[in-house]
């Protein structure tokens, strides 16, 4: 029997799950930690969110918020940060943070 080897993709996703299980992280930190582009991290997060459902855990998204007027982007289903605030149209947006619980 050959040992079961992880693909590089599986390794990244496993590490991402470990990091997010240990604490809340923003995409920039995850990107630096795992040496993946932020775009790749978002793709992994979407995949992980779907795959976690089977394990009874979930990806908790602390939503983005507008730093100018305090508007909170509660209802975004995709993990990408919003470009600007729908209320005041400014672009000083605190980016979402993620955890697995
Ligand atoms: Zn605003």
Image: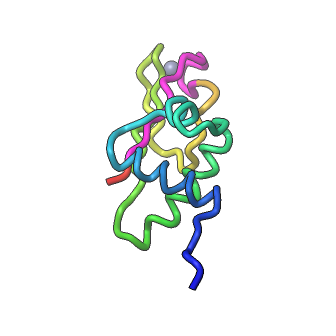
Residue 21: horizontal and vertical position, in percent? Answer: 35, 50
Q: Relative to the observer, which residue lies in front, 8 or 90?
A: 8
In the rendered view, tell whether residue 18 sits above or below residue 26.
Answer: below
Judge from the rendering whether residue 22 lies leftward or rightward of residue 87; answer left or right.
left
Judge from the rendering whether residue 81 lies leftward or rightward of residue 73; answer left or right.
right
Residue, x 53% and y 45% (percent of image)?
Answer: 76
Residue 26: horizontal and vertical position, in percent? Answer: 47, 33
Prevailing SS of the magenta stretch:
loop
Residue range corresponding to the magenta coloring? 85-99
Q: Relative to the observer, which residue lies in front, 96 or 21?
A: 21
Q: How many marks do you count on the picture?
A: 0
Q: Does the magenta segment cover residue 44?
A: no
Residue 85: horizontal and vertical position, in percent? Answer: 56, 25
Res 40 → quadrant: top right
Residue 51: horizontal and vertical position, in percent? Answer: 51, 66
Residue, x 49% and y 48% (percent of image)?
Answer: 16
In the rendered view, tell whether residue 50 sits above or below residue 101.
Answer: below
Q: Relative to the observer, which residue lies in front, 68 or 57?
A: 57
């Amino acid at each position: 029997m050959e040992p079961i080897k992880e693909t590089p993709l599986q390794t990244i996703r496993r590490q991402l799950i470990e990091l997010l299980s240990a604490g809340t992280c923003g995409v920039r930190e995850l990107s630096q930690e795992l040496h993946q582009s932020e775009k790749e991290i978002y793709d992994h997060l979407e995949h992980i969110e779907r795959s976690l459902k089977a394990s009874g855990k979930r990806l908790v998204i602390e939503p983005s918020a507008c730093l100018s007027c305090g508007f909170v982007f509660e209802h975004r289903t995709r993990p990408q940060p919003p470009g600007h605030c729908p209320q005041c149209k400014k672009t000083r947006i605190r980016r979402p943070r993620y955890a697995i619980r």
